[in-house]
Amino acid sequence: MNKSKIEKLNKNGWMVGSVSDFLSLSAEESAYVELKVSLSRYLHQTRTKKHWTQEQLAKKLKSSQSRVAKMEKGDPSVSVDLLVKSLFALGTSKNELAKAIQ
């Protein structure tokens, strides 16, 4: 967000901050959320780059298309374990996974 917009919001009584500030997240909680978001985005990018449908990935994982959609949207009910397993099912290497979370 540019400075003039921030100043305008502040002038009108609004506060500008991060999600961590708003939710009062600790550094560890914030890092965990960022990790899940990174994995979710990378899952979507990798799946679409490989021209897989959500349904195809779901079948490979013995899951449902709606679950894959939740994984890609960063739904809180999705575990990091499932995101990593899904990326490995798409052929992601450990090195690619490491780059995705950096």
Image (cartoon, helix red, strand yellow):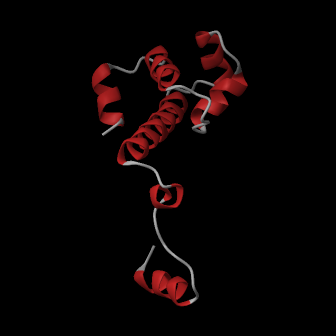
Question: Which residue occupies the foreground of this view, 42 or 79?
Answer: 79
Residue 88 position by quadrant: top left
Q: Residue at x 62, y 36 (%)?
A: 75
Q: Give the percent coordinates (x, y) of residue 79.
A: 53, 25
Question: Which residue occupies the foreground of this view, 52 or 36?
Answer: 36
Extreme residue in the left direction? 95
Residue 93 position by quadrant: top left
Q: Is residue 84 left or right of residue 64?
A: left
The correct choice, above or below, for 62 with respect to 64 in the image is above
Q: Quadrant of the N terminus?
A: bottom left
Q: Residue at x 47, y 36 (%)?
A: 36
Q: Is residue 31 left or right of residue 37?
A: left
Q: Quadrant of the C terminus?
A: top left
Question: Which residue occupies the foreground of this view, 59 or 66?
Answer: 66
Q: Residue at x 48, y 26 (%)?
A: 80
The correct choice, above or below, for 18 with respect to 84 in the image is below
The correct choice, above or below, for 34 with respect to 82 in the image is below
Total residue callouts: 0
Residue 29 position by quadrant: top left
Q: Is residue 71 left or right of residue 91?
A: right
Q: Give the percent coordinates (x, y) of residue 58.
A: 64, 17
Q: Residue at x 58, y 88 (%)?
A: 12
Q: Give the percent coordinates (x, y) of residue 83.
A: 50, 25
